[in-house]
Amino acid sequence: MADGTHKGPGLYIVIALILGVITYIEYYIVEFPPVWLSASWVLFWLVTLSLAKFWMVIWFFMHLRDDDKLYTGFFASGMVIAMGTFVALAAMFLLPRAVAPVVAAQESPAIVTDHGDPYADHPDPVPQELRDLIASDGMSRSLARRSDAPRPKDQTLRITPPQAPDDTFTLRLDDEELDELDLGDAEVASDPEADAGAAAVPSPEETEAEAPTLAAAPDESDDADARDPTFDRELGAQVYAANCSGCHQANGRGIPGAFPPVAGHGAELYALDGGRAYLVDVLLYGLQGAIEVNDQAYNGMMPAWPHLSDDQIAAVLNHIVAGWADEDEPADFDAYRADEIAAERGRGLSPADVHALRATLRD
């Protein structure tokens, strides 16, 4: 450049603006790195912009050296602006880092995680295993147990029925089968009361003498067999304990909000018009949907139990309706029979269909 020349303020203003833009771009890249820009590319652009700034600063001062108005008011004001810009940029870089520890040190509001025991008001103790099953949505069981009993499609309340143990069994023989059983040299214990009863059997002569009196009584043997209120209480209790007590509890009172009670409620359903068949359908086909029992709402899915035998389903239904020591047996209760259960199989109902049947029950 020629000595003693003056280029005017326009060139200096343009150079200052370019330097400011480059500085703000650097600030943005450092403080707010774009997600699409990798760390290596960030470093590359910072170095490139720094070199560009360095070259422009050298060029800027080369012009100032040859400017005959180096100490004019314009240059002085430009220096003030440059210093102010430097201070502002320094503040932009340093203040956020100085304030951040103060903000982080502020106390966060306490988060309440202990809401107490939700089963504290339950009349019976809830086993820890059942608590874990409910809290983990069934995931506390082993992988094999979860594979054997997949969760239902309805995700409102996912319930996995407990599995009955298969390492025990009960053998029952009636009198005729016991007589035909070859016991070999085994000794059969004699029952003194049975022997006394056998001695009290009347002779044929005594029977003939009492024949008119016996003939006067009506023969109701067929009706008695058809509507015998007695049932196999032991089998019903065993089936319930193995398959139902995990959810509805051993005493049949259930868990409020999770599993409805069956003690007492089973008899209430049985007494309704259509309730007898409805209870069979619940066991065979399951139940899905919102229900209300004793002013408590439930919304889940009762799994179906078609793999149980007809005798087992009949026995457990008898237990649910009339097998509780602290609940009154329905006055007109007619025990369920295996042939009645067999007649209900094959209807192909869904759990939602059974829920619709519940709405049709009437007093």
Image (cartoon, helix red, strand yellow):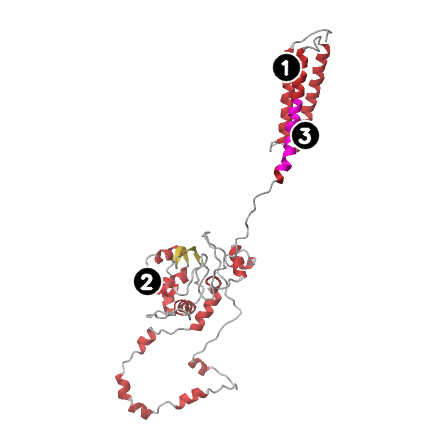
Question: Whole-percent x and y of residue 146?
Answer: 53, 57
Magenta residues (range): 85-102
Q: Considering only order in the chain, which callout, 3 or 1, is on the residue closer to the N terminus?
A: 1
What amino acid does circle 1 point to? Ile
Residue at 38% x, 56% y: name it.
355
Q: CA distance from mark 1 to mark 3?
A: 28 Å
Name the front one of labels 1 and 3.
Answer: 1
Image mark for residue 43: 3
Predominant secondary structure in magenta?
helix
Which x, y percent locates residue 87?
66, 24
Q: Secondary structure at mark 1?
A: helix
**Foreground of the two, 354 or 91:** 91
Q: Residues within 10 Å of mark 2 (few under 14, many from 20)?
A: some
Identify the residue under disc 1. Answer: 13
Query: Which image quadrant: the N terminus?
Result: top right
The image's mark for residue 274 is 2
Left or right of 229 on screen, residue 29: right
